[in-house]
Image (cartoon, rainbow, N blue to C red):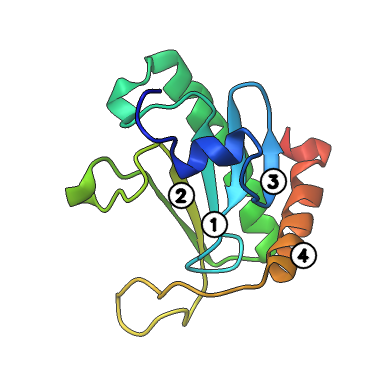
Amino acid sequence: MTEIQCKFCKIIEKKEKAVILFEDKKIIAILDNKPFNRGHTLILPKKHYKFITDIPDREVGYIFKNVNRIAKAIFSSVKADGLNISQNNGEIASQTIFHVHVHIIPRFKNDTKSNKFPSRKHFTIRELRKSGKYIQEVLNTSSFE
């Protein structure tokens, strides 16, 4: 990559800290450090792609297979009432870090007034690690493989 290295690439290379829920050769799942709700997770391909349309179909399938598996674990561990799963491409679509990532956002009854999206929360790294631990425990059970 010739441009200044992105924040997510730094996390993937362990040059920047993150609470990692899952990692393999192709993807990494981390807790969002400014989550909308407890358990808000980002799934990132390890290879840098700016937009999802830049990724070969087979790799997109692999990412979303894992999005589904990780979403099940998050749903169960944080006892969410629902989930938002989103993937933004381009500034006009609210993409702020130009490395493909998929948001898994647990939703809870009364987490917002009206039909608006909840505001971002500020958890300490300790709180993030604690919620991450519960998600990892569920994720590592055989029923989520």
For numbered disc 4, what is the local secondary structure? helix
Residue 130 lies in quadrant: bottom right
Residue 135's x, y, as percent? 72, 54
Q: Secondary structure at mark 1?
A: loop
CA gap, disc 1 and disc 4: 13 Å
> Does residue 67 appear in the picture of this structure?
no
- Say which element carries label 2: strand
**Label 4: how many Cα within 10 Å (few below 14, some 14–19, many 20+):** few
Which numbered marker is on residue 21? 3
Q: Are marks 4 and 3 in contact (CB under 8 Å)?
A: no
| Residue at position x 68%, y 64% in the image | 128
Left/right of residue 127 with respect to residue 70 in the rendered view: right
Judging by the rendered image, the residue that carries numbered circle 2 is 103
Cβ atoms under marks 3 and 1 closer than 8 Å: no
Disc number lying in front (1 or 2): 1
Identify which residue is drawn at 21% across, 48% down.
Answer: 91
Q: Earlier in the sequence, mark 3 or mark 1?
A: 3
Q: Give residue 70's position: percent from left, percent from top.
A: 62, 43
Residue placed under numbered mark 4 in the picture = 130
**What's the amino acid at mark 4?**
Lys
Q: Residue furthest left?
A: 92
Query: Are circles 1 and 2 on residues that touch, CB within 8 Å?
Result: yes
Residue 99: x and y in percent read 40, 36
Asked whether disc 4 touches disc 2, contact meaning CB atoms under 8 Å apart, the reply is: no
